[in-house]
């Protein structure tokens, strides 16, 4: 089996990243959730893949072909006084699964986190996403039970 190589995504990876992001959207749709393919190469390049960007990514390759990615941004937990890496996405192409690609992506994210003085990685997962939950359990992750994720669309803000 050929080795998995993980490297930071560059701006020229935007198109392949968007293709894989849409693959992830498709998987989430297959779980019964409404997800639209809103990300485009242009929005990704405007918002990320650069210093001080809102989103960055790591790409996993086998024989120089992209097989998966994780997307991340910076976060902070004030109560715990700890720097966080927020994992926006984790995806491995179906043909590349169960070969340790996700494990290599998370290992690279952990290494990046250590470099940045980060104490934890945080992400969301759909409760029906059994393969992902099995993977996350395998790597030692836990679910928060004491709070819920909330969001406010700025267009819906009631001052
Ligand atoms: C979840 C996902 C990222 C795992 O990627 P992967 O590269 O296949 O995972 P790995 O090969 O690194 O798996 C490592 C270990 O995790 C566990 N694991 C991974 N996938 C699993 C599955 N489908 N069922 C049970 N356990 C699984 C196993 O312990 C596995 O070790 P093993 O193969 O020696 O048994 C991949 O299935 C995926 O991309 N799913 C669709 C997208 C998605 O749902 N992403 C997460 C959104 S929150």
Image: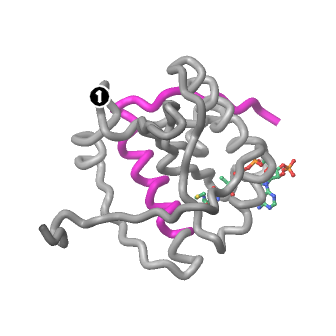
- The residue closer to the viewer here, 45 or 146, is 146
In the picture provided, is 157 more to the left or to the right than 84?
left
Q: Residues within 10 Å of mark 1 (few under 14, many from 20)?
A: few
Residue 115's quadrant in the figure? top right
x then y, percent, for residue 35: 41, 72
Q: Residue under circle 1?
A: 52
Q: Secondary structure at mark 1?
A: loop
By secondary structure, the bulk of the magenta-drawn segment is best described as helix
Farthest top residue in view: 115
- The residue closer to the viewer here, 64 or 71, is 71
x then y, percent, for residue 17: 43, 46
In the picture provided, is 30 more to the left or to the right than 21?
right
x 44%, y 61%: residue:
22
x 29%, y 28%: residue:
52
x then y, percent, for residue 94: 66, 58
The stretch drawn in magenta includes residue 56: no
Quarter of image, ligand 1: bottom right
Residue 10 lies, with reference to residue 126, above or below; the image says above
Residue 69's quadrant in the figure? top right
Q: Which quadrant would the N terminus be assigned to in this image?
A: top right
- The residue closer to the viewer here, 80 or 84, is 80
Q: Which quadrant would the C terminus be assigned to in this image?
A: bottom left
Indicate yes or no: mark 1 CB to ligand 1 under 8 Å: no
The stretch drawn in magenta includes residue 8: yes
Task: Find the magenta span and give its range.
Answer: 1-27
x then y, percent, for residue 89: 51, 51
Farthest front residue in view: 79
In the picture provided, is 92 more to the left or to the right than 130?
left
x 34%, y 34%: residue:
49
């Amino acid at each position: 089996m050929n080795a998995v190589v993980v490297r930071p995504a560059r701006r020229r990876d935007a198109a392949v990243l968007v293709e894989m992001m849409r693959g992830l959207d498709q998987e989430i749709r297959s779980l019964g959730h409404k997800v639209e393919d809103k990300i485009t190469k242009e929005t990704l390049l405007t918002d990320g893949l650069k210093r001080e960007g809102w989103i960055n990514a790591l790409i996993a390759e086998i024989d120089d072909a992209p097989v998966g990615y994780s997307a991340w941004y910076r976060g902070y937990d004030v109560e715990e006084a700890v720097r966080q890496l927020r994992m926006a996405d984790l995806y491995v192409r179906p043909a590349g699964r169960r070969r340790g690609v996700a494990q290599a992506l998370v290992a690279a994210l952990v290494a990046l986190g250590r470099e940045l003085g980060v104490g934890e990685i945080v992400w969301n997962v759909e409760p029906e996403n059994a393969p992902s939950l099995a993977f996350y359990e395998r790597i030692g992750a836990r679910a928060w039970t004491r709070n819920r994720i909330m969001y406010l669309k700025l267009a819906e803000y009631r001052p």
